[in-house]
Image (cartoon, rainbow, N blue to C red):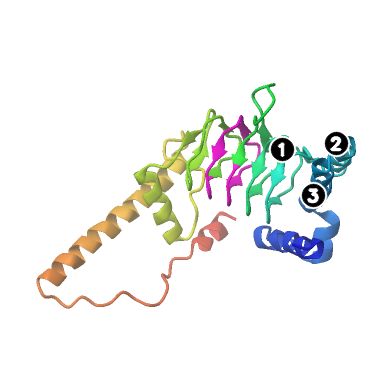
């Protein structure tokens, strides 16, 4: 892949994941995450050429300019986006797959002074919330999500969500059903656990569970009506009139 194509891809991913981005000039001149990725590619190339000191110095300059510290030995894939970025630390043996997103304050750190693999591996599509710490030679599975300020010290399965200190995995059948129902209603329940000690969160999850239960009951009723020979009208083609953004307007 040519350098120009890679730069175009890095700019495009900012527009995909940050609604605040307004122009290519703005991204190129004011986005530290973009700058950090460009500098890291240079530092990583120097590192693989065995020019260790120059690679570390290049990385150090990038840290000074962006507030993002990426060891030149770290392996980073394509379309990785670091949003805001201040305080992000990526260790030497860390591996980040394609299409990952890291927010400010994220640490991909080690728990040992031994040589060899000692930092995390993020597979493709991982999202890591602000302030999260992923420590040790563990693996975060493809499309997994890590909640803000979580401390992850064990492997996270594919498509799971990890929250808390130490992080626990929200991948039960109930959580998956709840997230699926939330997406149908037009919002994401990402990194919000039903057992959080917050009355508003508990109320929201209660409404989601009730909605899922009603949908299930309606499906059973329609199935029984069809067995009895009743003519059941097809589902409406038009979208639901429910607008989740209306709730935000009320709150504002």
Q: Position of residue 4 (x, y in %)?
A: 81, 64
Q: Which stretch did the figure color magenta? A: 122-144
Label 3 SS = helix
Residue depicted at x 49% and y 61%: 244
**Residue contact at pointers 3 and 2, CB within 8 angstroms:** no
Residue depicted at x 66% and y 22%: 112
The reply to whether residue 207 is in sight is no
The numbered mark at residue 41 is 3
- Residue at mark 1: 90
Q: CA distance from mark 3 to mark 2?
A: 14 Å
Q: Position of residue 240 (x, y in %)?
A: 41, 70
Q: Position of residue 20 (x, y in %)?
A: 72, 59
Circle 2 or circle 1, nearest the eye: 2
- Residue at mark 2: 52
Residue farthest to the top, as pictured: 113
Position of 216 compared to 64: left or right? Answer: left
For mark 3, does the 10 Å Cα neighbourhood hold few (<14), some (14 to 19), or many (20 or more) residues? some
Residue 127: within the magenta?
Answer: yes
Label 2 SS = helix
Label 1 SS = strand
The reply to whether residue 58 is in sight is yes
- Mark 3 or 2 closer to N-term? 3
For mark 2, does the 10 Å Cα neighbourhood hold few (<14), some (14 to 19), or many (20 or more) residues? some
């Amino acid at each position: 892949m040519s350098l120009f194509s890679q730069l175009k891809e890095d700019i495009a991913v900012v527009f995909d994941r940050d609604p605040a981005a307004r122009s290519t000039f703005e991204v190129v001149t004011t986005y530290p995450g973009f700058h950090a990725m460009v500098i890291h590619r240079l530092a990583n190339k120097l590192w693989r050429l065995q020019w260790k000191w120059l690679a570390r110095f290049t990385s150090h300059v990038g840290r000074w300019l962006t507030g993002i510290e990426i060891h030149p030995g770290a392996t980073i894939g394509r379309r990785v986006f670091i949003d805001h970025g201040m305080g992000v630390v990526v260790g030497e043996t860390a591996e980040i797959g394609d299409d990952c997103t890291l927010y400010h304050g994220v640490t991909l750190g080690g728990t040992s002074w031994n040589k060899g693999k000692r930092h995390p591996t993020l597979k493709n599509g991982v999202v890591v919330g602000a302030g999260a710490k992923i420590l040790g030679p563990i693996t975060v599975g493809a499309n997994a999500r890590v909640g803000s300020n979580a401390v992850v010290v064990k492997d996270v399965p594919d498509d799971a969500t990890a929250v808390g200190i130490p992080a626990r995995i929200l991948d039960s059948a109930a959580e998956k059903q709840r997230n699926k129902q939330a997406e149908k209603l037009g919002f994401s329940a990402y990194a919000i656990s039903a057992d959080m000690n917050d009355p508003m969160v508990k109320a929201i999850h209660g409404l989601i569970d009730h909605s899922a239960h009603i949908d299930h009951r309606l499906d059973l009723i329609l199935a029984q009506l069809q067995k009895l020979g009743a003519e059941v009208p097809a589902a409406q083609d038009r979208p639901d009139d429910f607008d989740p953004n209306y709730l935000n307007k009320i709150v504002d």
